[in-house]
Amino acid sequence: MTINYSEKIPNNVDLANDRTLQRALEHWQPHFLQWWHEMGPTDFEKADVYLRTAISVDAQGWAHYGAVHMPDYRWGIFLADAVAERKIGFGDAMGQPVWQQVPGEYRSTLRRLIVTQGDTEPASVEQQRMLGHACPSLYDLRNLFQVNVEEGRHLWAMVYLLHAYFGRDGREEAEELLARHSGDPDKPRILSTFNEPMRDWLSFYCFTYFTDRDGKYQLKSFAESAFDPLSRTCRFMLTEEAHHMFVGETGIGRVIKRSLEVMKELGSDDPARIRAHGAIDLPTVQRYLTFWCSSSLDLFGSEISSNSAASFASGMKGRPDEEQYADHVLRSAVFPMALPGGKTEGVPMLNALNEVMRESYLKDCDIGVKRWNRLIERAGHDFRITLPSSRFRRSIGPWAGVPVDPQGRQISREEYERRLPEWIPSETDRAFIQSLMKRVAEPGKMAAWIAPPDRGINNLPVDYEYVKMH
Ligand SMILES: [Fe+2]
Ligand SMILES: [Fe+2]
């Protein structure tokens, strides 16, 4: 199915033949644009940004690249093609046809799941809105804006579902998605990670690596959903999401590469000397990674959850890559859950699915860590990046508030408080990183704390003028 760009709202859902829905979305559209104007990237509305826009939902060659003013980006509604005769792949209704409408009994739960996912999309744009002023290069600035416009499109994806399938409640929720704001004391975003302020690019790379990857896992579990429109929406969102994690992985990799270059030049791994040279020492990189990884682990919810059991059993939300498992019903499976105090308890697998997801998420996070460690190893250093245990610094679930070190060992509260600054960024770290945040906007130039990327965007050279300021 090709995308119709001649319409006010680009789409591949035949919007022109559903006048009521079209009118409702055309009513929401100016509210979205006003939100973008007020809460999107500051001061770059007139810049020409080299962006990709979806032109079809095929895996191959779906994107068109060209210079765009961000407010003119063609945000629209794109669903992956329907799978003929698709059947429910898990839960108690496994094998039955998927749903093209929302079953009444699941309406409020599905709406909540869609609203929670939808809320994260504009939240991240809001968190990142000041970063453009401190970009380390035009290449990075362009990548930030690409991520931002696509998160805006992900909001459209969820708003389409709310409008098309949830009637008046859905339309009200769509308005609320523009009314909550990241970090707003009165009307904050739903999930706490999306209210963390983001003032520096190291945090941005960590966010796109860890927090966008949580998004990937949520989308993967929705891609399995029995509610077919949700599944198709999320399948296409996943193809966009891959770029966001690429930005995170290569961004952190380039910070490490630069750090290693400076270590070689100085013949020293002394953090103070590396910092004096304008680069970021590896222990500081590690503390930022630990902070954002642990903050993102909470997004999967409590280790033991009756909500996750109900969402799975009913068919609303599967496990990422459901086909990799043998048992898709899980009525008799048990999960050995490690709990504080050294106990391990057998928990019904259905109630442990948040933890199953968290574990597979951490495995996925480890892939980039291995690549970064190879860089460090090849440069001849013993330092190794590690991920924190999923028990570290949790605020949800049985490990919430339990003093645990990054390796997952329970320790005394006194030791925890004392050593926390070794594990996550201190005020001094943050002040140092902030001191590096100066805009570099000459084509091909990079800030002193980051190495250039291996290649440019869409086969263009690294020194291409990806953002033209006016
Ligand atoms: Fe997204
Ligand atoms: Fe994303």
Image: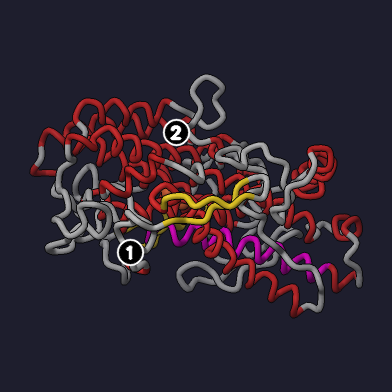
The residue carrying mark 1 has its beta carbon less than 8 Å from ligand 1: no
Q: Spatial distance from mark 1 to mark 2, Cα to Cα?
A: 48 Å
In the rendered image, residue 23, in percent from the top left (x then y), is placed at 17, 32
User: Which-is-in-front pick, marks 1 and 2?
Assistant: 1
Secondary element under disc 2, as helix, strand or loop, is helix
Quadrant location of residue 55?
bottom left
Which circle marks residue 265 in the picture? Answer: none
Please determine whether, in this image, residue 53 is positioned above or below residue 366.
Answer: above
In the rendered image, residue 424, in percent from the top left (x then y), is placed at 74, 47
Whether residue 48 appears in this view of the structure is no
Name the residue located 24 percent from the left edge and 43 percent from the top edge. 9
The residue carrying mark 2 has its beta carbon less than 8 Å from ligand 1: no
Name the residue located 47 percent from the left edge and 47 percent from the top edge. 148
Secondary element under disc 1, as helix, strand or loop, is loop
Whether residue 264 appears in this view of the structure is yes
Name the residue located 36 percent from the left edge and 45 percent from the top edge. 309
Is 241 in front, or is 130?
A: 241
In the rendered image, residue 214, in percent from the top left (x then y), is placed at 49, 52
- Using a 10 Å C-alpha cutoff, classify the residue at mark 1 as few (fewer than 14 neighbours), some (14 to 19) or many (20 or more): few
For marks 1 and 2 on the same chain, the one whose residue lies earlier in the sequence: 2
Is 294 in front, or is 26?
A: 294
According to the image, label 2 marks what residue?
37
The N terminus appears in which quarter of the rendering?
Answer: bottom left
Name the residue located 49 percent from the left edge and 46 percent from the top edge. 300
Number of numbered discs on residues: 2
According to the image, label 1 marks what residue?
327
Horizontal relation, residue 405 to residue 329: left or right: right
- Using a 10 Å C-alpha cutoff, classify the residue at mark 2 as few (fewer than 14 neighbours), some (14 to 19) or many (20 or more): some
Query: What residue range appears in magenta?
Result: 238-262
Q: Does the magenta stretch include residue 227?
A: no
Please determine whether, in this image, residue 314 is positioned above or below residue 258.
Answer: above
Which residue reaches farthest left? 17
